[in-house]
Image: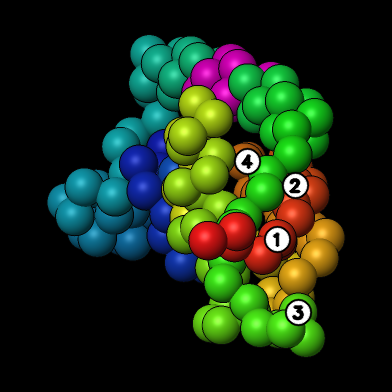
């Protein structure tokens, strides 16, 4: 029996796949549970159209992420912190601080998408990685400077 999966089913396939399963499994479990529909000609055409639209949307999202990555790599961020005489800062620089700095510059980046390459506890120049898309990552250079108060 040929079915089109509406959701991921373990050991059978993922959503949108056209799979062949035993008649009893399809008729008694997959279809009644709403996990699959019968693979008629109309359903197959509909599924292919949905896949095309999803592909176009993913491509548009990726191209937007590419543009954003280029913009982010061309900016510089400076974070002012209180520090001791030896250059050691009180506390640590967090991804939330970087997200706030990026938001001030017009980039709406969630703090959970920012990962610091190392723990920042000194003054100096550091790098953070921003996950913009599953295939696109941007590298952000930032400077940690002593607060002049």
Which residue position is annotated with label 4?
133
Residue 88's disc number:
none
Q: CA distance from mark 3 to mark 1?
A: 9 Å
In the picture as drawn, the residue positioned furthest to the left comes out as 32
Where disc 2 sits, the SS reads: strand
Give the number of the mark in front: 2 or 1: 1
Which residue position is annotated with label 1?
145
Residue 140's disc number:
2
Q: CA distance from mark 3 to mark 2?
A: 22 Å
Q: Is residue 73 visible to the viewer in this orientation of the structure?
A: yes
Residue located at (63% from left, 21% from top): 64
Q: CA distance from mark 4 to mark 2?
A: 15 Å
In the picture as drawn, the residue positioned furthest to the front comes out as 149
Q: Are marks 4 and 2 in contact (CB under 8 Å)?
A: no
Tally the marks.
4
Magenta-colored segment: predominant secondary structure: helix
Q: CA distance from mark 4 to mark 1?
A: 30 Å
Residue 39 place in picture, x, y as percent: 40, 30
Residue 94 vertical placement versus 38 (above, below): below
Q: Which residues are magenta?
A: 54-63
Q: CA distance from mark 3 to mark 4?
A: 35 Å
N-terminal label among 4 and 2: 4
Residue 28 vertical placement versus 87 (above, below): above
Is residue 9 rendered to the left or right of residue 128? Answer: left
Residue located at (50% from left, 15% from top): 53
Residue 15 place in picture, x, y as percent: 45, 44
Give the number of the mark in front: 3 or 4: 3
Which residue position is annotated with label 3?
87
Residue located at (74% from left, 52% from top): 142
Q: 50 or 62, which lies in front? A: 62
Is residue 3 rendered to the left or right of residue 132? Answer: left
């Amino acid at each position: 029996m040929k079915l089109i999966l509406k959701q991921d089913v373990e050991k059978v396939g993922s959503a949108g796949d056209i799979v062949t399963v035993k008649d009893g499994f399809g008729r008694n479990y997959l279809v009644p549970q709403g996990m699959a529909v019968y693979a008629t000609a109309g359903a197959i055409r509909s599924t292919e159209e949905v896949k095309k639209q999803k592909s176009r949307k993913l491509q548009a999202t990726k191209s937007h992420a590419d543009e954003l990555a280029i913009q982010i790599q061309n900016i510089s961020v400076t974070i002012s912190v209180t520090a001791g005489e030896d250059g050691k800062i009180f506390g640590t620089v967090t991804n939330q601080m970087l997200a706030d700095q990026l938001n001030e510059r017009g980039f709406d980046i969630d703090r959970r998408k920012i990962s610091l390459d190392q723990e920042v506890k000194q003054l100096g120049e550091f790098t953070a990685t921003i996950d913009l898309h599953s295939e696109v990552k941007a590298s952000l250079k930032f400077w940690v400077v002593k607060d002049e108060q």
